Image (cartoon, grey):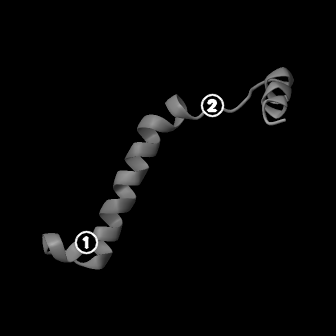
Amino acid sequence: MGHLFGIGKGTAGEILHDICAALIDLFFHRLIKFPNTDLEIQETINGFS
């Protein structure tokens, strides 16, 4: 992909890493929720059976 923009592979890799880190910072806690209580954990487990 770097050749499309005239940058090296290393630079393209750094940019991709920065973009992924920014997306994680913005969306991780909005989209992924971990259970906080024993009841929530059990409900999550039961949801898979």
- For the N terminus, the quadrant is bottom left
Q: What residue is drawn where x is 45% and y is 36%?
A: 27
Judge from the rendering whether residue 36 lies leftward or rightward of residue 19; answer left or right. right
Q: Residue furthest front?
A: 49
Lateral position of residue 33 relative to residue 36, left or right: left
Residue 31 located left or right of residue 18: right
Q: Position of residue 44 (x, y in %)?
A: 78, 30
Residue at the image point whose x is 79% and y is 36% from the top: 48
**What label does residue 32 carry, if any?**
none
Task: State the residue at coordinates (13%, 75%).
Answer: 6
In the rendered image, which residue does mark 2 sit on? 33
Vertical order, 37 against 9 (above or below): above
Name the residue type under label 1.
Met
Dot 1 or dot 2, earlier in sequence? 1
Residue farthest along the left direction in this orientation: 6
Label count reads: 2
Q: Which residue is mark 1?
A: 1
Is residue 29 placed above or below 18 in the rendered structure? above
> For the residue marked with disc 2, what is the amino acid?
Lys
- Coordinates of residue 39 in the picture (x, y in percent): 85, 21
Q: Position of residue 16 (x, y in %)?
A: 34, 61
Q: Image quarter for residue 36?
A: top right
Q: Residue at x 52, y 32 (%)?
A: 31
Please give left or right for residue 41 compared with residue 26 in the image. right
Q: Quarter of the image holding residue 33?
A: top right
Mark 1 nearby-residue class (10 Å; few <14, some 14–19, many ≥20): few
